[in-house]
Image: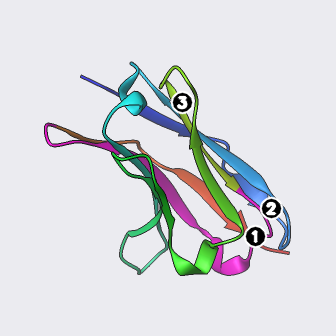
Amino acid sequence: QVHLVESGGGLVQPGGSLRLSCAASGNIFSIGAVAWYRQAPGKERELVAEITSAGSTNYVDSVKGRFTISRDNAGNTMYLQMNSLKPEDTAVYYCNAKSYYYNYWGQGTQVTVSS
């Protein structure tokens, strides 16, 4: 019923920046937890960044200081600002909204970091 759609991915050189967006069909991001995951070829999907249901933010060690997760006041859109990108950041990035009652996923957007 609730659909999430990622955008903003693409090809960027090492050291560059991208901002990913995730648009929801409702204000689903205003409640529960929101997160960004990524999956590289041959690897398991990993949690990159999250805003917990209590409002705190957490990041995987490999992106701390480089990535920032956020959401707008209306709760319709969430973002992942990615700076100082590295080739190892190359992956498909997925947005996620989760609560006790639901677990919604987007279809993913490709991020490729290469010279």
Secondary structure beneath label 3: strand
Dot placed on the residue nearer the N-terminal end, 3 or 2: 2
* Coordinates of residue 25 in the picture (x, y in percent): 40, 20
Which circle marks residue 85 in the picture?
1
Task: Give the mark toward the camera: 1 or 3.
Answer: 3
* Coordinates of residue 1 in the picture (x, y in percent): 24, 22
Secondary structure beneath label 2: strand
| Circle 3: residue type | Thr
Q: Which residue is mark 2?
A: 12
Q: Residue at x 66, y 62 (%)?
A: 67
State the separation of the CA atoms marked 3 and 2: 23 Å
State the separation of the CA atoms marked 1 and 3: 22 Å
Q: Residue at x 38, y 69 (%)?
A: 45
How many labels, in total?
3
Q: Are marks 1 and 3 in contact (CB under 8 Å)?
A: no
| Circle 2: residue type | Val
Which circle marks residue 112 in the picture?
none
Q: Residue furthest left?
A: 101
Which circle marks residue 77 in the picture?
3
State the separation of the CA atoms marked 2 and 1: 8 Å
**Where 57 sits versus 65, above or below?**
above
